[in-house]
Image (cartoon, helix red, strand yellow):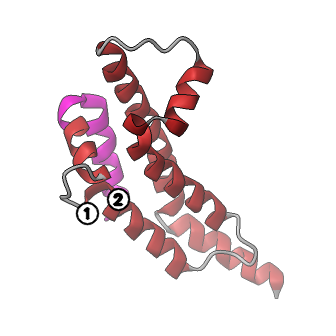
């Protein structure tokens, strides 16, 4: 029976948008980090090394909003590695959480508002968003 369950899980995972969405969000995260880094450096700040940038991403208030997307990708990774296999309901909830994060808030400094501003400024982010929107349904 365990083999049947795993086979069902694999089929369910292949039919679900979560794995593709996770990969799209990871690519988006990189685009957003690069855009924020460029804006930060344009303001006269110097990032001297990848380690310094990593530290800024983890600790500097300016980059705090990006951590929400990082955390969501980690939650997706953990869910897809769960034993027993993640349920369809949990996968659906993670997709809904992604939709809410990207578009669900109009609070002035929310992730969704900051993300919308970057979508307007950065063509690559707008293109990535169009692809992600297909996965969000």
- Principal secondary structure, stretch drawn in magenta: helix
- Graded by Cα atoms within 10 Å as few (under 14), some (14 to 19) or many (20 or more), the crowding at tag 1 reads some
Count how many numbered circles sit on residues in the image. Answer: 2
The answer to which image quadrant residue 105 occupies is: bottom left
Q: Which mark is residue 9?
A: none
Magenta stretch containing residue 79, yes or no? Answer: no
Task: Name the residue rendered at 35%, 22% in the picture.
Answer: 40
Q: Quadrant of the N terminus?
A: bottom right
What percent of the width, then of the height, locates residue 2?
82, 83
The answer to whether residue 43 is visible is: yes
The answer to which image quadrant residue 4 occupies is: bottom right
- Relative to 111, does residue 34 appear above or below in the rendering? above
Foreground residue, 114 or 92? Answer: 114
Task: Name the residue rendered at 63%, 75% in the picture.
Answer: 86
Magenta stretch containing residue 133, yes or no? Answer: yes
> Magenta span covers which residues?
120-137
Task: Name the residue rendered at 61%, 71% in the picture.
Answer: 11
Task: Name the residue rendered at 51%, 30% in the picture.
Answer: 56
What percent of the width, then of the height, locates residue 69?
45, 50
What percent of the width, then of the height, locates residue 20?
49, 54
- Graded by Cα atoms within 10 Å as few (under 14), some (14 to 19) or many (20 or more), the crowding at tag 2 reads some
On the image, numbered disc 2 is attached to which residue? 101
The answer to whether residue 28 is visible is: no
Q: Which mark is residue 104?
A: 1
Foreground residue, 102 or 86? Answer: 102
Q: Could you tell me which secondary element the residue under label 2 belongs to? A: helix
Relative to 92, 85 lies left or right:
right
Relative to 112, 68 lies left or right:
right
């Amino acid at each position: 029976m365990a083999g049947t369950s795993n086979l069902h899980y694999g089929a369910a995972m292949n039919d679900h948008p979560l794995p593709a969405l996770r990969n799209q969000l990871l690519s988006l995260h990189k685009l957003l980090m690069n855009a924020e880094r460029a804006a930060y450096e344009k303001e006269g700040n110097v990032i001297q090394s990848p380690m310094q940038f990593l530290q800024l991403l983890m600790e500097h208030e300016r980059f705090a909003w990006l951590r929400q997307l990082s955390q969501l990708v980690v939650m997706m990774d953990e869910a897809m590695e769960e034993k027993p296999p993640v349920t369809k309901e949990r996968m659906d909830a993670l997709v809904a959480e992604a939709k809410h994060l990207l578009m669900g808030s109009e609070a002035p400094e929310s992730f969704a508002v900051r993300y919308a501003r970057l979508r307007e400024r950065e063509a690559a982010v707008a293109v990535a968003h169009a692809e992600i929107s297909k996965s969000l349904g």
